[in-house]
Image: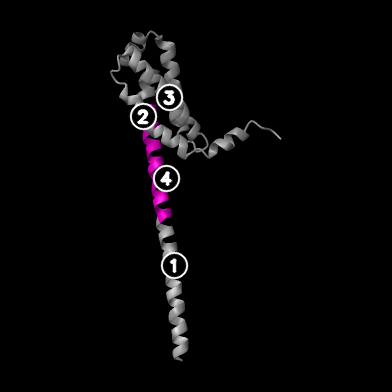
């Protein structure tokens, strides 16, 4: 009988060792899930920023936006175009298959905005596009897997 108890105790110890890595793997999954939730929250915040704070003033021709584009010398056509691109990018940040492509496109707009801030506005707000470029780059990299699906869309069989 003592031999049976010894085998049972040994099995219990082996079983407890085998569950320990599973528990740590479960915590990694929890951290990964938390990272995905945080990334999604950043996407929502950026979508709200680009849609409401950046695109809306351009699309409704707010006097500050009109003044900025007149100072650059681009006029209202460019203002409405950039506003529409920012609004489309904001919406696409929330669409799973388009989120990486949207982050890349908005990042390109931010590079252009940085250059304009340096040249036309003497670097007055040049840090803002760079600050926005950092999370956009993270989103483009982290959500890159749907890009393959996008490349397959135009191919017809």
Nearer-the-camera pick, 79 or 113: 113
Look at the image and tell me whether residue 52 can be seen: yes
Please tell me which residue is depicted at 43% across the width and 13% down the height of the picture. Answer: 78
The picture places residue 58, in percent across and down from the top left corner, at 38, 18
Compared to residue 152, the image places residue 35 above or below, namely below
Image depth: mark 3 or mark 4 in front: 4
In the rendered structure, find residue 19 and report the number of the disc placed on it. 1
Residues at marks 3 and 2, CA–CA distance in whole angstroms:
13 Å
Residues at marks 4 and 2, CA–CA distance in whole angstroms:
19 Å
Please tell me which residue is depicted at 62% across the width and 35% down the height of the picture. Answer: 152
Nearer-the-camera pick, 4 or 55: 4
Q: Give the mark, 4 or 1, whose residue is nearer the N terminus.
A: 1
The picture places residue 40, in percent across and down from the top left corner, at 41, 41
Q: How crowded is mark 4: few (under 14 residues within 10 Å), some or many (20 or more)?
A: some
Residues at marks 1 and 3, CA–CA distance in whole angstroms:
49 Å
In the rendered structure, find residue 86 and report the number of the disc placed on it. 3
């Amino acid at each position: 009988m003592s031999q049976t108890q010894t085998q049972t105790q040994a099995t219990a110890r082996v079983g407890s060792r085998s569950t320990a890595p599973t528990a740590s793997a479960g915590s990694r999954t929890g951290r990964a899930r938390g990272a995905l939730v945080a990334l999604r929250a950043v996407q929502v915040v950026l979508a709200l920023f680009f849609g409401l704070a950046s695109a809306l003033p351009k699309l409704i021709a707010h006097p500050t936006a009109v003044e900025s584009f007149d100072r650059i010398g681009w006029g209202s056509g460019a203002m409405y175009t950039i506003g529409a691109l920012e609004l489309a990018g904001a919406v696409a940040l929330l669409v799973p298959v388009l989120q990486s492509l949207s982050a890349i496109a908005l990042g390109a707009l931010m590079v252009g905005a940085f250059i304009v801030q340096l040249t036309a506005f003497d670097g007055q707000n040049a840090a803002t596009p760079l600050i926005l470029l950092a999370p956009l780059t993270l989103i483009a990299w982290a959500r890159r897997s749907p890009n393959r699906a996008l490349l397959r869309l135009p191919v017809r069989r």
